[in-house]
Amino acid sequence: RLKTTILITAAGTGLLAAAGNVLYDYMINRDQKYMFGPLKKHKRSVNVGEFIRMELSEETISWAEKTTITQRQTNAYDGTLLNGYCFEQPKTKSSQRWVIAVHGYGQSASAMFPFVKPFYEAGFNILIPECRGCGRSGGNYYGLGWGDRMDVIKWSRLIAAEQPNAEIILFGLSTGADAVVMAAGEANLPVNVRAIISDSAYSRLTDESNYTLKKSHVPAGILTFATSLVTYFRAGYSFAEASAVNQAAKSHTPILFIHGGNDDYVPVEMVYELYEAAECPKDILVIQEATHGYSMFADYAQYWERIWKFTDTYMPVKTDESSYLSRLKNQIRRFRKTA
């Protein structure tokens, strides 16, 4: 009987380890091996042609092609090569206002072009880091926000070192939103970071994994545990520690939380949990008809009106920059009339 119990336990443990490794390779491994590999297409880096969202696509492509973009690289705290791209204001419009825009799961820098264009037109310099495991950055795994938070801080400190008077906004989409919220909870975030904008962040990675697996009608709890354990040994972090709720609670930096009411990847309940946890200055915008990461495309005018109101509060506009925002607000009004 003891022998049978040991064999059953060993077999169960082996199956659990195998399942955890398969899910790790599907969700987190950059190479995405096993049976799922051929179903995933790896994005190497900037690809202007990937825009397919509404009429904003053509306008964004035209802007990206006409605007000078430069490549930046640095090393993460663990030595991983980090790659990024900058849209800097012309020298005649020298600016120390920056937006660091962090893309979502498995994407590359160009996914953020539609989101940074209005900031650039408002006089901000733009830095779009490519998260570890993505684009031309190094690393063999996806950080899912938690593994990227210190990289976001590294980029922020790099800008602060080059421009001590820089004012920085951290803007993140999906897992990029988690990266910026989680960075907000770290003590070494530079004081130059004045505001954070989080669009479509999950609350806890464990809860997000359980939610996703339950939709596939599999035993979510045990598979999340197995994948978390494998992730700890292969990537150095566990799902349990990846909590945007805990990090938001430690933030002293103002945070604007944005979410889609019809988000079927990250349920809208999670944004309310994040908002309640945050004790810093905060605001929330839920666009009811929007799906995951599509709030801007669902209601462009409301999206940017709320962002400008938030940023104006914590990064007051200087006199020489007011013309930029006036022009943008006029664009929003025209967009509202034609929508």
Image: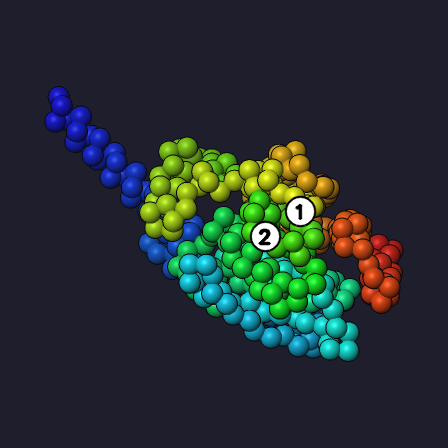
Pointer 1 with pointer 2, Cβ within 8 A? yes
Instruction: Please tell me which residue lies in front, 176 or 254.
Output: 254
Residue, x 39% and y 59% (percent of image)? 140
Residue, x 60% and y 65% (percent of image)? 161
Instruction: Please tell me which residue lies in front, 320 or 171.
Output: 320
Q: Is residue 261 above or below residue 125?
A: above
Can residue 106 be seen at all in this image of the molecule? yes
Q: Quarter of the image holding residue 324?
A: bottom right
- Residue 162, percent across and down? 62, 68
Instruction: Please tell me which residue lies in front, 203 or 220.
Output: 203
Can residue 171 be seen at all in this image of the molecule? no
Marked residue nearer the N-terminal end (1 or 2): 2
Residue, x 50% and y 67% (percent of image)? 74
Type of the residue with mark 1: Thr
Q: Quadrant of the N terminus?
A: top left
Q: Quadrant of the C terminus?
A: bottom right
| 29 relative position to 124: left or right | left
Q: Secondary structure at mark 1?
A: loop
Type of the residue with mark 2: Leu
- Residue 12, percent across and down? 25, 34
How packed mark 2 is, by other alpha carbons closer than 10 Å (few <14, some 14-19, many 20 or more), is: some
Q: How many marks?
A: 2
Q: Quarter of the image holding residue 9?
A: top left
| 146 relative position to 161: left or right | left
Task: Give the residue at mark 2.
Answer: 189
- Residue 128, percent across and down? 60, 64
Q: Secondary structure at mark 2?
A: loop
Task: Give the residue at mark 1.
Answer: 253
